[in-house]
Amino acid sequence: MSELVFTHGDFWSGNTVWDGVRLTGVVDWSGAHRAPRGIDLAWCRQDLALLHGRGDAPDVFLAAYDDAAGVKIRRMRLWDLHAGARAEDRVEEWAPNYEGVARPDLTGERLRARLDAWNDHLLRG
């Protein structure tokens, strides 16, 4: 069984605070709970795939996390698929949230296409 840790519950770019390139805070802890760390990591990796489309941002983030935490996340692809399943029926509704982080180009249609591409990538994995 995975180790339970204190998780954010909605860890995505819109809940982070930055000073230039330095992360200075994480906000909106209303969904915080104990859960396997893969839950937050997968949610963030999915957000990076939605933000950047095809690219290596999700893997760069995971490698940096593994290095900083000194922990290699087991079965990351399964956590990613879990996040994708949670987003499947509502990703289009998130477009206004991305407008709030200066990404009005991420329409519901574009978010759907990027989520589908991310999930296809994971399933081929």
Image (spheres, rainbow, N blue to C red):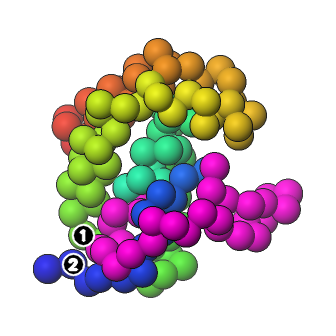
The segment highlighted magenta reads 14-41
Residue drawn at 71 percent across, 40 percent down: 101
In this view, 61 is above or below 92: below
Q: Which residue is at the front of the view, 51 or 62?
A: 51
List the residue tagged with mark 1: 74
Q: Is residue 23 above or below residue 110?
A: below
User: Would residue 15 be found to the left or right of residue 76 on screen?
Assistant: right
Q: Is residue 97 magenta?
A: no
Residue, far left: 1
At 24% across and 50% down in the image, what residue appears?
82
Say what amino acid the circle numbered 1 marks.
Arg
Q: Are marks 2 and 1 in contact (CB under 8 Å)?
A: yes
Q: Is residue 24 magenta?
A: yes
* Amino acid carrying mark 2 in the image: Ser
User: Measured along the vertical axis of the image, is residue 24 above or below residue 103?
Assistant: below
Q: Quadrant of residue 35?
A: bottom left
User: Where does residue 99 sit, x and y in percent of width and height?
Assistant: 68, 31
Crowding at dot 1, Cα within 10 Å, few <14 / some 14-19 / many 20+, comes out as: few
The quarter of the picture where the N terminus appears is bottom left
- Give the residue at x 59% y 24%: 106
45 on left or right of 34? right
Of circles 2 and 1, the one toward us is 2
Instruction: Report the residue marked by disc 2.
Output: 2
Mark 2 vs mark 1, CA separation in Å: 8 Å
Q: Which residue is located at x 21 percent, y 63 percent? A: 75
Q: Which mark is residue 98?
A: none
Q: Position of residue 24 (x, y in %)?
A: 76, 70
108 and 21: which one is in front?
108
Closest to the observer, 7 or 75? 7
| Residue 28, quarter of picture | bottom right
Q: SS for tag 2?
A: loop
Q: Secondary structure at mark 1?
A: loop
